[in-house]
Amino acid sequence: MRRKRLTRMSEYYQTCVSLPPRSRGFHLITTEILDAIPEIQRFEVGLCHVFIQHTSAGLTINENADPDVRVDMETAANQLCPEGSPFIHTCEGSDDMPAHVKASLFGACVTVPIQSGRLMLGTWQGIYLCEHRNSGGPRRLVITIQGKLK
């Protein structure tokens, strides 16, 4: 493996973004993330970390071309943890505890490499907001870029 010697410290950029409320399901948000971080163009190499500040929604990376994938992801998530399961935490509605479980399964963050000012997502990859509540409301993301500037 070829290694480069580091000659200067990494640069950082961080911002918070509020996504508008969405219906339950899996929603592509790659463009919204990129719109929030035009500074990414200044980075030669690095990482983009996206963190959601909620416990009933998650983030994941999956296919960005066929919208049927998003429908199938929602179907699979509901099969893994359906509403009506015998949960104790039900004070916020029947969709709340299944949403917490699904959020833990999918995770609260994604990290994507940066190269030449661009996210290094694969041809058919996009970043999804996994909205697990029927009415989740606005969702807050913390986006952090770290790396070497051009």
Image (tube, rainbow, N blue to C red):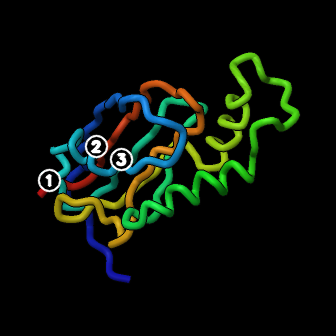
Please tell me which residue lies in front, 18 or 84: 84
Please tell me which residue lies in front, 122 or 132: 132
In the displayed structure image, the side of residue 10 where residue 73 appears, left or right? right
The amino acid sitting under disc 2 is: Glu
Residue designated by label 3: 29
Identify the residue at the far right of this view. Answer: 86
Residue 143, percent from left and from top? 34, 39
Please tell me which residue lies in front, 47 or 123: 123
Identify the residue at the far bottom of this view. Answer: 1
Q: Is residue 146 above or below residue 115?
A: above
Q: Quadrant of residue 83?
A: top right
Gap in Å between the C-alphas at discs 1 and 3?
A: 18 Å
Camera-near label (1 vs 2) is: 2
Q: Is residue 79 above or below residue 104?
A: below
Q: State the residue at coordinates (59%, 38%).
A: 132
Picture quarter with the N terminus: bottom left
Q: Which element is circle 1 on?
A: helix
Q: State the residue at coordinates (43%, 60%).
A: 67
Residue 132 is tagged as none
Residue designated by label 2: 32
Q: Is residue 95 above or below residue 9?
A: above
Alpha-carbon neighbours of circle 2 within 10 Å: few (<14), some, or many (≥20)?
A: few
Residue designated by label 1: 41
The amino acid sitting under disc 3 is: Ile
Q: State the residue at coordinates (55%, 37%).
A: 57
Residue 113, percent from left and from top? 34, 61
